[in-house]
Every structure is written in structure tokens, then in C-alpha cells.
Image: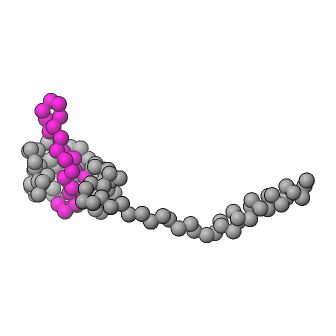
Amino acid sequence: MKAASTILIILFLCPAVVLAGKEVPAEKFKYNSYGRRDPFVPLVGIKERRGTGGVASILTVEDISLQGILTNPDGTKSVVINGDIMKEGDQIERLKVVQIGENSVKVELNDTNYDLKLYK
């Protein structure tokens, strides 16, 4: 009985020892959205561009991603920029939201004003 249990232990441990140093190849799969939005990518909070993402990582106007304009129940507007929600007058690091329109936002970055359009 002791020999049988030793053989079973060896049979179970040998593959683990042999495979321990080998990398298992990752599955390669590319989703084809056929021109539609990829449902596996979040609508808000996409970390792109340089830095850690968010408004705090903005250095130039090219780093700004205007993702949406929200109308709150009380009629005020908010804006989603690089995954962060801001309202008129809010300032994070170098970026200040000056005015929010229906389809555009006026921001101030490094003492320069820019008009960002939601739809280009």
C-alpha cells in the first residue's frame, strides 16, 4: 500500500515539476466590432495617452479627451474629461472648466483658453 501511494504522489508531482518552468502561451483573440462600439471597452474611464490617466495627467491640449456632457436633474451641466467628472468652475491641476455648452466645452489649460467640441 505504501508503494502504491508513493507511485501516485510521483505521478501527480512530476507534471507539476516539469511544467513549472515553462510559460503557457496566452490565447490570442481579436474581437471584430464591425464598425460598432466594442462592448468590452468601458464608455467612461478609458486610460489612454500618457501618464496615469485622468485630468491630473493632462499636460497639453492633445492630452484632453472630451468624453461626454451630462445634464443634471437640476438643469446644471457636468462634463466627463479623461474619465473625470467636472462642472463649471472646477479646476484640477492645470485644467479649469470655464463654460459647458450643449455640444462643446470651454476650458483653460496653462492660462490658454480652448473650445472642445463633443462632436467633430
Q: Residue at the far top: name it.
A: 74
For residue 111, say whether it is visible. no
Q: Any magenta on residue 73?
A: yes
Q: Which residue is depicted at the point 17% across and 31% down?
A: 73
For residue 18, say whether it is visible. yes
Residue 83 vs residue 18: left or right?
A: left
Q: Which residues are magenta?
A: 58-82
Give how far across and how far down residue 32 sits, in percent: 33, 61
Q: Which residue is depicted at the point 30% across and 63% down?
A: 50
Residue 1 vs residue 44: left or right?
A: right
110 up-or-down from 19: above or below? above
Q: Nearer the viewer, residue 111 or 45?
A: 45
Residue 78, by quadrant, is top left
Q: Residue at the far front: name it.
A: 34
Residue 56 vs residue 30: left or right?
A: left
Tally the numbered discs.
0
85 up-or-down from 108: above or below? above
Quadrant where the image shows the C terminus: bottom left
Give how far across and how far down residue 16 sits, in percent: 69, 63
Give how far across and how far down residue 34 sits, in percent: 27, 60
Q: Nearer the viewer, residue 37 or 83?
A: 37
Q: Which residue is depicted at the point 77% across and 62% down?
A: 11
Q: Any magenta on residue 103?
A: no
Q: Which residue is depicted at the point 89% across and 58% down?
A: 3
Give how far across and how far down residue 43 sits, in percent: 28, 49
Q: How is the image coloured?
A: one colour
